[in-house]
Image: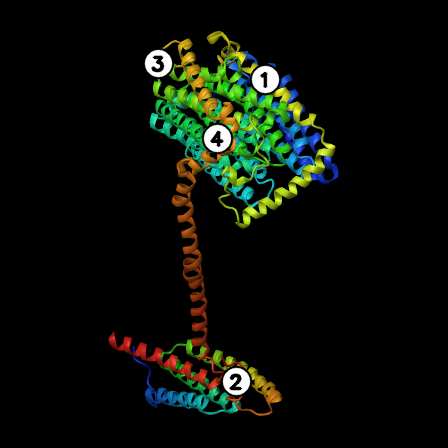
């Protein structure tokens, strides 16, 4: 079975997804502002969503859609918790640099 | 296994009374000793005396016979099939019980005088009572495990009593030595019990003896007898496990009389007599035990010549006499061995108690070189000792004559002429050193005020802290005794000795009449008959008796010539000095047994201890534990370094890990 035809070739979708994902990864590793890091994580989620939906469409399989919804839910929860942590840390430390928040180092 | 009954079963409440009264005494005296004070002695003596009366009252229980079964058997508890515990009171147990409680009672009474003024008066009687209880446990048990328990308790009681004056380092060392050697014997008996349980499946005497023939091969039977005999040798001071007995004289003299002469050391004789069916079935075991007994008899007698300490002379004579008993029961002359136990219990207790009177009156002097001429000062002690000496030498009419004669003739009857010869020679040596003791102690001039060096007395370990402590302690004890004389009447020490005198003379008369004597008839149902083939002695009993008498007379004559003549007595100081100087080192050092044990066991054990203490423990064991701890710390340090606390670092690890997965699957995928 071949993937059903797309106006745009499937490789482009996957390539876009990969690009967005690596943007996210780079953002998490490089940036020190927790808000930016959270946003980068969201980017990674959405890259994954894009790939899921692409494959779902290509293979005519609803599982990919369902997983995408699940990821969106998890992302929402993650954002809520992550922002809450950021607020608490900001209250205590008065600055938002993740490298400064290293009290659990060995 | 078929169950074999042991005696006539019943409840026999008096038996429990005999057995438990001394235990009650020990508990009461131990608990309320400080409150009882000087009452402690009479209480302890009364309880043992009551046990003696109860034993006498139970005489008919022990001697009853019906349907080939003899004695009273009171089962108590059954733990597992084959592991039933109870009391057995047959003729053999009766003899031992009467001696333990009877002579025990006399020695309790004597101790009231001897120990008066001692700080731990009640504790002493608690231990004595405990000893009587332990010995009764040993003798009254109807099974091997009960015997082993009694065996161990007796060793413990002996340890307590030898080390009674625990301020003396020498007493503590002697107690420890006795305990260690006795435990060695316990291990032998434990081993025998294990073999018996494995092979027979029961611990009861009746079951074991009844099934021995089917359960054991002759080799296994020999092993069982050998293991049992290790216990006997340790408890009864047989070569080479005898070295603790002379040292045990560190205990108070009544202890020496009760434990290390009359009762405990004869436990080995009891065990072999009790296990007569096993020994009857194993010719090799009889051979071995007979030879060891004879060896001990002559070795002890020869050492008796070389001693100057009055209690040590008696200790070696005890060792020698027990050698006789062991030889007798070993060759199969069981009733002769038990008769010698009976007579020996009386005359040896008398000798020790007589010696105790001397020691007590001379303010703890034990060296016979510093005695002399005591016949006039202490006529009563002289008569007591004289009767004891005549009895132990086997002068006709005295008890020792009958039992020694029975033993010696028994060895011939069972076909051991060499053991007979050794026994006869030992009788001569015994006569020599016992009369030497008598002459040196009681005749001539009193030498207590002669300077020690004039008599050749050297304290081999003088100047060591132990000796100094002992001397200091003795001086202190003397003061105690000084105050003790005031409230301890002399009769309380003399009376028990006076009771022992007629028994020392007359108890042997039970054996008058040969095969039909009261003694032989009494034990006829107990011991198996001697093997008929060996029952032919080369010489008649009368001739044997004459030979023994001639040798004994020669021994006495030699002692008289060397110590008893007017010339010898007049020059006693110089003569004793010369003899001390010329004493062969091999005798002074007691055949180097102690040195050999020291070199063979103690030194290697101490060296091994030092090796383990200085190397294995600190380096191997502690080192190992430390290394485990160190490596845990090292690993912790290693993993700690990953925990930077940098969230971005962790993210990098994650990415790296995911990348690894991706690469891995890419490669695998490409491979497919």
Between marks 1 and 2, how big is the CA–CA gap? 99 Å
Q: Nearer the viewer, mark 4 or mark 1?
A: 4
In the rendered image, which residue does mark 3 sit on? Answer: B534
Q: Residue at x 43, y 46 (%)?
A: B602
- Name the foreground residue: B32 vs A52: B32
| Picture disc at residue B316 | 4
Between marks 1 and 3, how big is the CA–CA gap? 34 Å
In primary-sequence order, the first of circles 4 and 3 is 4
Task: Mark 4 vs mark 1: tell me if same chain.
Answer: yes
In primary-sequence order, the first of circles 1 and 3 is 1
Judge from the rendering whether residue A6 lies leftward or rightward of residue B27; answer left or right. left
| Picture disc at residue B190 | none
Q: Nearer the viewer, mark 2 or mark 3?
A: 3
- In the rendered image, is residue A3 in sight? yes
Q: Position of residue B221 (x, y in %)?
A: 38, 27
Task: Give the vertical position of B383 relative to A9 (above or below).
Answer: above
- Name the foreground residue: B401 vs B360: B360
Q: Residues within 10 Å of mark 4 (few under 14, many from 20)?
A: many
Between marks 2 and 3, how big is the CA–CA gap? 100 Å
SS under mark 1: helix
Q: Residues within 10 Å of mark 2 (few under 14, many from 20)?
A: some
């Amino acid at each position: 079975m071949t993937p059903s035809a797309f106006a745009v070739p499937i490789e482009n979708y996957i390539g876009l997804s990969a690009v967005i994902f690596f943007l996210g990864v780079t953002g998490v590793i490089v940036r020190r502002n927790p808000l930016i890091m959270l946003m980068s994580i969201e980017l990674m989620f959405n890259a994954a969503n894009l790939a899921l939906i692409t494959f779902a469409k290509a293979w005519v399989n609803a599982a990919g859609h369902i997983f995408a919804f699940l990821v969106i839910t998890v992302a929402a929860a993650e954002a809520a918790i992550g922002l809450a942590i950021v607020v608490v840390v900001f209250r205590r430390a008065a600055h938002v640099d993740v490298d400064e928040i290293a009290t659990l180092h060995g | 296994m078929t169950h074999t009954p042991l005696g006539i079963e019943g409840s026999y409440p008096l038996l429990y009374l005999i057995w438990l009264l001394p235990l009650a005494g020990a508990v009461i005296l131990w608990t309320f000793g400080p409150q009882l004070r000087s009452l402690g002695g009479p209480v302890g003596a009364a309880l043992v005396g009551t046990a003696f009366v109860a034993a006498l009252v139970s005489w008919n229980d022990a001697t009853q016979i019906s349907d080939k079964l003899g004695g009273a058997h009171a089962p108590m508890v059954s733990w597992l099939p084959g592991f039933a515990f109870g009391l057995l009171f047959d003729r053999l147990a009766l003899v031992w019980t009467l001696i333990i409680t009877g002579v025990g009672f006399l020695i309790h009474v004597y101790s009231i005088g001897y120990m008066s003024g001692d700080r731990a008066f009640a504790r002493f009687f608690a231990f004595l009572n405990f000893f009587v209880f332990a010995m009764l446990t040993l003798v009254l048990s109807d099974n091997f495990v009960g015997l082993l328990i009694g065996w161990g308790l007796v060793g413990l009681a002996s340890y307590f009593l030898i080390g009674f004056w625990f301020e003396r380092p020498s007493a503590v060392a002697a107690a420890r030595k006795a305990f260690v050697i006795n435990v060695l014997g316990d291990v032998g008996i434990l081993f025998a019990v294990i073999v018996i349980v494995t092979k027979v499946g029961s611990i009861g005497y009746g079951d074991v003896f009844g099934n021995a023939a089917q359960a054991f091969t002759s080799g296994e039977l020999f092993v069982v007898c050998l293991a049992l005999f290790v216990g006997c040798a340790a408890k009864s001071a047989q070569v080479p496990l005898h070295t603790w007995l002379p040292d045990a004289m560190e205990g108070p003299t009544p202890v020496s009389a009760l434990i290390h002469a009359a009762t405990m050391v004869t436990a080995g004789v009891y065990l072999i007599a009790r296990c007569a069916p096993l020994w009857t079935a194993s010719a090799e075991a009889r051979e071995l035990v007979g030879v060891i007994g004879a060896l001990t008899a002559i070795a002890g007698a020869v050492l008796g010549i070389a001693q100057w300490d009055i209690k040590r002379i008696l200790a070696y004579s005890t060792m020698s006499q027990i050698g006789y008993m062991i030889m007798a029961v070993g060759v199969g002359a069981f009733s002769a061995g038990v008769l010698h136990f009976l007579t020996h219990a009386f005359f040896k207790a008398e000798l020790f108690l007589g010696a105790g009177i001397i020691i007590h009156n001379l303010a703890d002097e034990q060296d016979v070189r510093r005695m002399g001429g005591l016949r006039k000062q202490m006529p009563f002690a002289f008569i007591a000792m004289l009767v004891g000496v005549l009895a132990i030498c086997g002068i006709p009419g005295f008890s020792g004559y009958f039992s020694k004669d029975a033993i010696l003739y028994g060895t011939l009857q069972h076909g051991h002429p060499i053991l007979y010869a050794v026994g006869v020679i030992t009788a001569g040596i015994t006569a020599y050193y016992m009369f030497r003791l008598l002459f040196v102690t009681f005749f001539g001039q009193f030498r207590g005020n002669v300077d020690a060096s004039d008599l050749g007395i050297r304290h081999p370990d003088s100047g060591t802290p132990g000796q100094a402590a002992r001397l200091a302690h003795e001086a202190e004890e003397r003061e105690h005794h000084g105050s003790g004389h005031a409230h301890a009447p002399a009769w309380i020490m003399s009376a028990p000795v006076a009771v022992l005198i007629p028994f020392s003379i007359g108890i042997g008369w039970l054996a008058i009449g040969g095969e039909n004597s009261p003694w032989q008839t009494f034990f006829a149902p107990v011991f198996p008959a001697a093997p008929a083939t060996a029952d032919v002695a080369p010489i008649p009993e009368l001739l044997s008796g004459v030979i023994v008498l001639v040798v004994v007379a020669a021994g006495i004559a030699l002692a008289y010539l060397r110590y008893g003549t007017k010339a010898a007595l007049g020059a006693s100081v110089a003569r004793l000095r010369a003899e001390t100087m010329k004493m062969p080192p091999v005798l002074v050092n007691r055949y180097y047994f102690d040195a050999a044990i020291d070199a063979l066991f103690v030194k290697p054990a101490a060296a091994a201890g030092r090796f383990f203490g200085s190397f294995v423990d600190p380096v191997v064991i502690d080192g190992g534990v430390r290394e485990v701890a160190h490596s845990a710390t090292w690993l912790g340090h290693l993993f700690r370094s990953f925990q930077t606390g940098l969230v971005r670092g962790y993210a990098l690890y994650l990415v790296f890990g995911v990348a690894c997965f991706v690469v891995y699957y890419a490669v695998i995928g490409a491979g497919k």
